[in-house]
Image: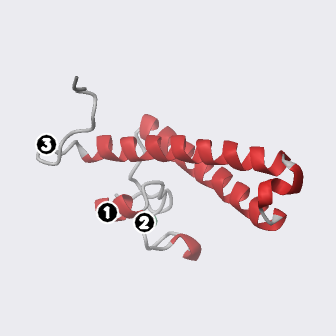
């Protein structure tokens, strides 16, 4: 039995925006799963074996990734995805491939987001 619901094969690339939407939705799902698992660990005796400070850091970073991904998906539905929030210029597709949640072009991005 075969399924036809897989992502587009390489010889038929999806529209860039469609590809970024798939990347963002995959990341949103993966980070949500991660956050759920980390939260379960945090409630276990001895934090499921994690150093509590490291676990806190992982939970914070999973929350930030979820928020950034949700924000990018919202920009996509509003039609502002891929446009720099500061200078209104298009964000190069290469940058979006590396950082699909980027809301700024490389020039306007805060230093910590630069890639
Ligand atoms: Zn900019």
Q: Could you say whether the residue bearing mark 1 is in a helix, strand or loop?
A: loop
- State the residue lying farthest toward the left: 11
Crowd rating for badge 2 (residues with CA inside 10 Å; few <14, some 14–19, many 20+): many
- State the residue lying farthest toward the top: 1
Residue on which the image places disc 1: 92
Expressed as whole percent of the image width and height from the top left, the position of residue 29 reads 52, 40
Q: How far separated are the C-alphas under marks 2 and 1?
A: 7 Å
Q: Could you say whether the residue bearing mark 2 is in a helix, strand or loop?
A: loop
- State the residue lying farthest toward the bottom: 111
Horizontal side, residue 45 vs residue 71: left or right:
right
Q: Could you say whether the residue bearing mark 3 is in a helix, strand or loop?
A: loop
Expressed as whole percent of the image width and height from the top left, the position of residue 89 reads 37, 60
Mark 3 vs mark 2: give the one in front. 3
| Residue drawn at x 36%, y 47% as measured from the top left | 20
Look at the image and tell me in which quarter the N terminus lies.
top left
Look at the image and tell me in which quarter the C terminus lies.
bottom left
Crowd rating for badge 1 (residues with CA inside 10 Å; few <14, some 14–19, many 20+): few
The verdict on label 2 being within 8 Å of ligand 1 is yes
Residue on which the image places disc 2: 105
| Residue drawn at x 76%, y 44% as measured from the top left | 40
Q: How far separated are the C-alphas under marks 3 and 1?
A: 21 Å
**Residue closer to the observer: 2 or 64:** 2
Expressed as whole percent of the image width and height from the top left, the position of residue 62 reads 64, 53
Q: Quadrant of residue 54?
A: bottom right
Q: Is residue 25 above or below residue 98?
A: above
State which tag comes first along the sequence, 3 or 1: 3
Residue on which the image places disc 3: 12
Expressed as whole percent of the image width and height from the top left, the position of residue 6 reads 27, 34
State which tag comes first along the sequence, 2 or 1: 1
């Amino acid at each position: 039995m075969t399924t036809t619901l897989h992502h587009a094969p390489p010889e038929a690339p999806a529209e860039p925006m469609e590809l970024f939407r798939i990347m963002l939705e995959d990341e949103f799902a993966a980070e949500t799963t991660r956050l759920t698992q980390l939260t379960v660990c945090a409630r276990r005796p001895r934090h499921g074996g994690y150093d509590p400070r490291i676990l806190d850091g992982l939970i914070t970073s999973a929350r930030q990734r979820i928020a950034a991904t949700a924000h990018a998906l919202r920009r996509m539905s509003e039609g502002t995805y891929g446009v720099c929030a500061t200078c209104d210029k298009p964000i190069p597709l290469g940058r979006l491939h590396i950082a699909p949640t980027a809301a700024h072009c490389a020039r306007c991005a805060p230093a910590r987001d630069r890639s």
